[in-house]
Amino acid sequence: MKKIAHRGISAQAPENTRAAFKKMVALNVEWLETDIDMTSDGELILIHDDKVDRVSNGSGSVNDMTLIELQKLDFGRWFSEAYANERIVTLKWLIDFINHYQFNVNFELKTALKSDTQHAYLTSVCQALRQVSSKVEIIVSSFDMTLLQKFHVLMPSIQLGVLIEAQLPDNIVEIAKNIGATYVHPDVTFLTKEQTHKLIDNHLQVNVWTVNDMIVAEKLEKWRVEAIFTDFPEVKAI
Ligand code: G3P
Ligand code: MG
């Protein structure tokens, strides 16, 4: 079973920062999960929350701030003084980093963008992903099925992951097949063995989030889960 570093090595360094990505490479972790959002001036940056408040010394909505405004904020000190002065990471920086170190990535498309900026967001994401080395495996996932469908039209060669929060819907196989997804990404809290096997029997691969418990990871491996998203991807026992 693969282990995907959730927002970088986010148990050891502030999530979605250069430090978290560098630590991943240092520990030979082969898969990264990260979140792509967009600034008010159309720059793609990596951040999980819709607001900067939890992970920086600033406040406000990411989509309302320019790249320059975001670059002034400290994205490391909230985690530890040792990481003071970590700055927002652009997708462009990460793609150069990926191409250099050749690891695989699950990019999550964020869902809070206003509908009039969605097209610009998707177009920019596609332009950026075209710069990724062909040796690197990519999955693009989202909780927003409409957004995934639109992305798929623009870039049909990229594998899709259907992200589901809470219970899997009864028609999950149909949903995933309709948008041409390869993967379903269920929430570990609600996933059952029967659901996992139904997905696998229908030729869908299962990547489960977020799994930080070794006993649970071992159980999922027995269920033939393809990968887990974890804050501890370097732990050998899982
Ligand atoms: O993509 C897996 C996981 O990252 C989804 O949840 O909230 O951490 O983005 P979240
Ligand atoms: Mg995510």
Image (cartoon, rainbow, N blue to C red):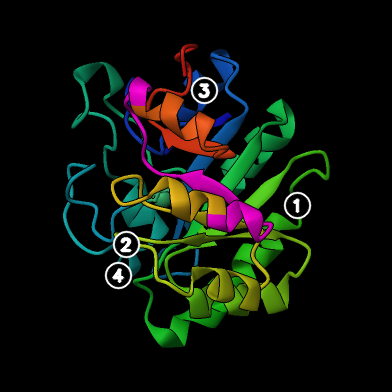
Residue 157, how many percent across, how many down?
Answer: 78, 63
Residue 51, how many percent across, how many down?
Answer: 23, 58
Residue at numbered disc 2: 167
Q: Amino acid at mark 1?
A: Gln
Q: Is residue 35 visible?
A: no
Q: Check residue 24 in the rendering and tell me which mark sits there, or answer none.
A: 3
Residue 154, how many percent across, how many down?
Answer: 71, 76
Residue at numbered disc 1: 131
Q: Amino acid at mark 3?
A: Met
In the rendered image, the quadrant that contains the N terminus is: top right
Residue at the (46%, 34%) spot, across then down? 220
Badge 3: few (under 14), some or many (20 or more) residues near its Cα, within 10 Å?
A: many
Closer to the chain start, of discs 4 and 3, is 3
Q: Amino acid at mark 2?
A: Gln
Residue at the (55%, 50%) spot, across then down? 197
Q: Which residues are magenta?
A: 198-215
Residue at the (64%, 33%) spot, across then down? 97
Closer to the chain start, of discs 1 and 2, is 1
